[in-house]
């Protein structure tokens, strides 16, 4: 009797049930037909996933769960395998046709497919239906209605929820500026001054009604607080997490479309989030890694085990799974339209350099009254231009 030599695949994920739950659940299922392949997932904080340095971990892992804004950098640095050379054509075609919103497109760059979407999210709104109902409040649909709700909430001694850590303020800025008709684009200029100033003022106004701890919160921390306390009935902007609307929670959150910041319904342009899965060019086992990747991203696993282990799939058929929608408090049906029309931020090779340098500037404008909006806009416009590929010789750390 002959035995295949055991192979170990190492992957790097971000540390939350939404990411790790379906990865851990997949291992025994995958090994039923692939007993010679061992799978190991290491975990990193959400902050490292969203703004860390990919180049520091490429040599340590075969598979990486990544954020799509890194794709331009990854393409230029030759970080990942082109999955078109490793995955079945049928799987790629299925995702290109039925991935939710622009999630498939977000991992395509320079005619290469550098990752496959495994998880999809966008910025949405979230509420505590029980608290809203007890006060007779209704979900706002426009920015003006949001401010009216916020004032009513404040009069009751309650707060609006707002994930306002630096990176989340930056993401909210990208959503609002896109909704106001001046999105950042791969081949475009920075937000025009009128939209920039208006977006900053809107975020400042929203923050004025927010819980005092908001500046320390990412979406997970905000939603954890909303589950455990009764003084936040509504949060207008944050990435969706189906886990918090699960039927198993005694207190459940409900997720909805964002408000129309331009007062035009339906409201679109919530920033695309989610995650992709890529194979490092340093992996000496790309074929085995691709086999496991194909299992994780298969329509069959995405529509069943992936969801029920707490994952938020990228495949459209999974979002239309009625049993899953019921189990997770109608998260999918209530946020599908928003995610289908999500705003895809730039992904050119210098974008993350710009993003990291812009975060503290935008956050300072929103959280204090001392900033010079006009000067900040001029500085950010110059930085954005300098980081464009056509200006590669002028790229520098700001």
Image (cartoon, rainbow, N blue to C red):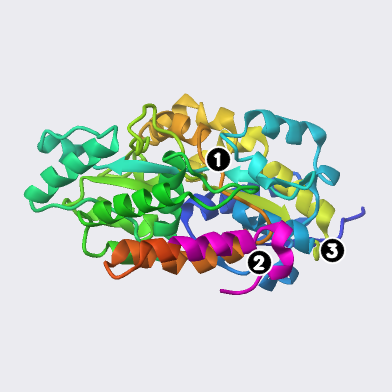
Q: First in sequence: mark 3 or mark 2?
A: 2
Name the residue carrying label 2: 54
Q: Left or right? Give the position of 26 relative to 124.
A: right
Locate residue 181, reporting x and y percent.
46, 39
**Residue 265 lies in what quarter of the image?**
top left
Locate residue 248, reporting x and y percent.
34, 42
Mark toward the viewer: 3 or 2: 2
Chief secondary structure of the magenta span? helix
Which of 198 and 217 lies nearest the eye of the viewer? 198
Q: CA distance from mark 1 to mark 2?
A: 23 Å
Q: Which mark is residue 63?
A: none
Q: Which mark is residue 284?
A: 3
Q: Which residues are magenta?
A: 377-398
Q: Residue at x 47, y 49 (%)?
A: 192
Q: CA distance from mark 1 to mark 3?
A: 28 Å
Q: Left or right? Give the position of 262 relative to 387.
A: left
Q: Left or right? Give the position of 131 relative to 372.
A: left
Mark toward the viewer: 1 or 2: 2
Q: First in sequence: mark 1 or mark 2?
A: 2
């Amino acid at each position: 009797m002959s035995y295949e030599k055991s192979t170990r695949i190492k992957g790097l994920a971000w540390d939350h049930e939404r990411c790790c739950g379906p990865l851990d659940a997949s291992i025994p299922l995958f090994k039923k037909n692939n007993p010679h392949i061992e799978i190991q997932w290491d975990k990193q904080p959400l902050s490292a996933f969203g703004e860390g340095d990919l180049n520091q971990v490429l040599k340590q892992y075969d598979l990486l769960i990544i954020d799509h804004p890194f794709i331009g950098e990854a393409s230029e640095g030759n970080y990942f395998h082109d999955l078109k050379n490793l995955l079945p054509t049928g799987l790629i075609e299925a995702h290109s046709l039925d991935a939710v919103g622009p999630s498939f497109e977000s991992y395509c760059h320079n005619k290469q497919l550098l990752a496959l979407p495994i998880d999809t999210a966008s910025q949405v709104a979230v509420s505590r239906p029980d608290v809203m109902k007890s006060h007779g409040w209704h979900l706002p649909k426009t920015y003006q209605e949001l401010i009216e709700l916020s004032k009513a909430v404040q009069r009751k001694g309650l707060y609006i929820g707002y994930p306002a850590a630096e990176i989340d303020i930056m993401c909210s800025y990208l959503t609002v500026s896109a909704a106001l008709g001046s999105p950042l684009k791969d081949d475009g200029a920075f937000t025009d001054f009128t939209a920039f100033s208006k977006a900053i003022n809107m975020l400042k106004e929203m923050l004025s009604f927010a819980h005092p701890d908001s500046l320390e919160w990412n979406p997970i921390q905000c939603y954890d607080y909303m589950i455990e306390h009764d003084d936040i009935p509504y949060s207008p902007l944050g990435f969706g997490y189906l886990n918090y609307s699960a039927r198993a929670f005694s207190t459940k959150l409900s997720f909805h479309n964002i408000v129309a910041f331009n007062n035009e319904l339906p409201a679109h342009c919530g920033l695309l989030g989610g995650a992709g899965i890529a194979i490092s060019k340093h992996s000496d086992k790309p074929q085995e890694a691709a086999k496991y990747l194909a299992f994780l991203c298969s329509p069959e696993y995405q529509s069943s085990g992936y969801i029920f282990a707490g994952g938020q799939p990228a495949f459209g058929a999974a979002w239309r799974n009625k049993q899953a929608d019921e189990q997770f408090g109608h998260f999918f049906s209530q946020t599908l339209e928003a995610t289908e029309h999500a705003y895809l931020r730039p992904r050119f090779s210098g974008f993350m350099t710009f993003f990291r340098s812009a975060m503290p500037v935008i956050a300072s404008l929103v959280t204090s009254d001392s900033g010079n909006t006009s000067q900040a806009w001029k500085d950010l416009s110059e930085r954005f231009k300098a980081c464009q590929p056509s200006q590669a010789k002028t790229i520098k750390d700001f």
